[in-house]
Image: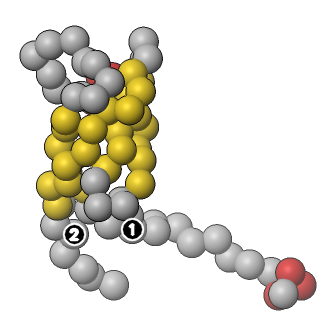
């Protein structure tokens, strides 16, 4: 299945910041995402309420689980 995965820019805001990670609430009822701080680019110390932008695309299943017929 060849589908072109084009990242989309989604706005959001920080709802929690710890010593190792940040939780971002994405706008448009897209949910929340937790990222390690090393993956965030910022010129200042991160604070709850800061607005952010995240590039997201679809998730592609690379190795599906094979179910045994006995489980059905």
In this picture, is 68 found above or below 10? below
Quadrant of the rendered structure where residue 33 is?
top left
Q: Find numbered disc 1 in the image and state the secondary structure of the residue it sits on.
A: loop
Query: x and y percent of residue 28 in the render?
Result: 29, 61
Marker disc for residue 5: 2
Residue in front for this viewpoint, 71 or 11:
11
- Is residue 54 positioned above or below 9 on the image? above
Residue occupying image coordinates x 52% and y 67%: 63
Residue 65 visible to the viewer: yes
Hey, which residue is sitting farthest right in the picture? 70
Query: Residue drawn 28% across and 54% down?
Result: 27
Furthest residue to the left? Answer: 43
Counting from the top left corner in percent of width and height, residue 26 is at: 31, 50
Marks 2,1: beta carbons within 8 A: yes
Q: Residue at x 14, y 13 (%)?
A: 44
4 sits to left or right of 72: left
User: In the rendered image, which quarter contains the C terminus?
Assistant: bottom right
Residue at (15, 22) in percent of width and height: 42
Q: Nearer the viewer, residue 25 or 19?
A: 25
How dense is the environment of label 1, judged by Cα within 10 Å: few (below 14), some, or many (20 and up)?
Answer: few
Mark 2 lies on a secondary structure that is loop
Quick one: quadrant of the N terminus?
bottom left
């Amino acid at each position: 299945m060849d589908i072109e995965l084009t990242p989309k820019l989604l706005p959001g805001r920080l709802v929690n910041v710890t010593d190792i990670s940040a939780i971002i609430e994405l706008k448009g009822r897209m949910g929340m995402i937790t990222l390690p701080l090393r993956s965030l680019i910022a010129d200042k110390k991160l604070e709850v309420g800061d607005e952010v932008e995240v590039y997201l695309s679809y998730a592609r299943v690379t190795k599906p689980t094979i179910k045994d017929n006995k489980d059905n």
